Image (cartoon, rainbow, N blue to C red):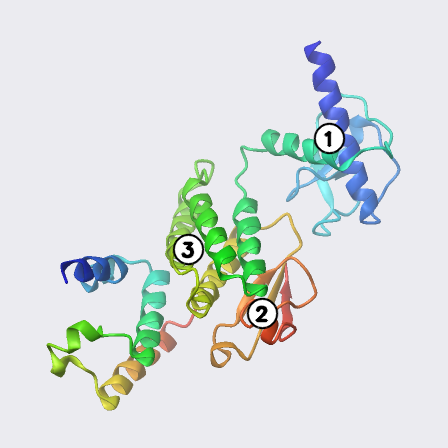
């Protein structure tokens, strides 16, 4: 029974990976389990040796040692199943440190500011504070750990201000600018599994600090919101 | 008043400044410039009693210029 369950889980995982690869036009013919390789940055992405990771474009070089039988694509995989599978892969890969949760919550905060939603930004700020505090850094070496603590300390101050200043969106945006610098450094130091863009608006703060990180290529300005939604440009892609 | 001091020290404590990480130091300096420009500090409740604590334009500019020159030196 237990083995059956594990095989089922693996099957879901593998199908969802194939699904993902297919979505991003990087679909390869389904390979047998013994030849599955993963991206060194995105262990959840697997495929034929030498093919490209759809997330970052790197070659798949890490051999995956799994003996389960690979299943053919199941076109019926529902969203929920995919989500479950992603959750499973996450727990499996929990030993490796990731800042994904920080980025996700930062993006929520950013999107609240895009919508001029001060209260939403405050709530997202409080969630991000908890995340920054609770991230497990045990697997990091001393140098990276210090780096993390330095950046996180600074970021925590900014999200605390954002959380405490519901209703004062200009004040929140000031701290958001500084928080964005921290998030930028997080991504640069620890990498991302998600495609991210560094955007810049020259109109904000006399052109000094109007940077932000976004998940979409389209510009949606969190510093001016509806006032100047499309002001800015992509500076960098992660 | 006591509370103001406590809260203020939590946000910026010059006695601890040397212990802050470089990131935090730079960030604090930038915040000082913003605070001075916005005329929020010193707090009104304080300047009522201590008129001489109000910074004039020259003093403000002097601080801002100094901070900017320090920040440029450490450009990262």
Q: Earlier in the sequence, mark 2 or mark 3?
A: 3
Secondary element under disc 3, as helix, strand or loop, is helix
Q: Where is mark 3, residue-wise?
A: A163
| Badge 2: chain ID | A
Mark 3 vs mark 1: give the one in front.
3
Q: Do the residues labelled 3 and 1 touch (CB within 8 Å)?
A: no
- Cα gap from disc 2 to disc 3, whole angstroms: 18 Å
Q: Specify few, some or many for label 2: CA neighbours under 10 Å numbering under 14, 14-19, or 20 or more.
A: some
Given residues A34 and B67, the one toward you in this image is: B67
Q: Where is mark 1, residue-wise?
A: A13
Mark 1 vs mark 2: give the one in front.
2
Q: Earlier in the sequence, mark 1 or mark 2?
A: 1
Secondary element under disc 2, as helix, strand or loop, is helix
Looking at the picture, how far across and down is residue A203, in whole percent?
Answer: 54, 80
Give the quadrant of the C terminus of chain B.
Answer: bottom left
Q: Tell me whether marks 1 and 2 sit on the same chain.
A: yes
Q: Specify few, some or many for label 1: CA neighbours under 10 Å numbering under 14, 14-19, or 20 or more.
A: many
């Amino acid at each position: 029974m237990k083995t059956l369950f594990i095989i089922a889980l693996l099957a879901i995982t593998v199908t969802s990976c194939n699904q993902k690869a297919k979505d991003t036009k990087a679909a390869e013919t389904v390979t047998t389990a013994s030849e599955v390789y993963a991206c060194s940055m995105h262990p959840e992405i697997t495929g034929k040796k030498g093919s490209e990771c759809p997330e970052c474009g790197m070659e798949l070089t890490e051999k995956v040692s799994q003996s389960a039988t690979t299943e053919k694509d199941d076109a019926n995989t529902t969203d929920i199943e995919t989500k479950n599978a992603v959750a499973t892969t996450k727990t499996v890969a929990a030993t490796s440190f990731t800042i994904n949760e920080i980025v996700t919550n930062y993006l929520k905060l950013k999107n609240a500011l895009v919508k001029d939603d001060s209260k939403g930004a405050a709530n997202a700020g409080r969630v991000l504070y908890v995340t920054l505090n609770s991230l497990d850094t045990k697997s990091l070496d001393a140098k990276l750990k210090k780096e993390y603590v330095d950046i996180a300390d600074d970021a925590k101050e900014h999200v605390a201000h954002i959380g405490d200043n519901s209703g004062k969106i200009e004040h929140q945006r000031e701290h958001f600018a500084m928080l964005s610098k921290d998030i930028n450094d997080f991504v640069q130091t620890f990498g991302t599994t998600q495609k991210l863009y560094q955007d810049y608006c020259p109109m904000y703060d006399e052109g000094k600090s109007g940077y932000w990180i976004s998940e979409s290529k389209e510009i949606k300005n969190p510093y001016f919101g509806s006032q100047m939604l499309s002001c800015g440009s992509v500076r960098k892609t992660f | 008043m006591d509370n103001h001091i406590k809260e203020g020290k939590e946000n910026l404590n010059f006695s601890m400044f040397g212990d802050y990480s470089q990131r935090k130091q730079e960030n604090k300096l930038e915040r000082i410039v913003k605070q001075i420009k916005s005329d929020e500090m010193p707090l009104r409740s304080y300047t009522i009693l201590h008129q001489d604590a109000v910074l004039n334009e020259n003093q403000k500019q002097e601080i801002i210029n100094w901070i900017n020159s320090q920040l440029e030196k450490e450009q990262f």
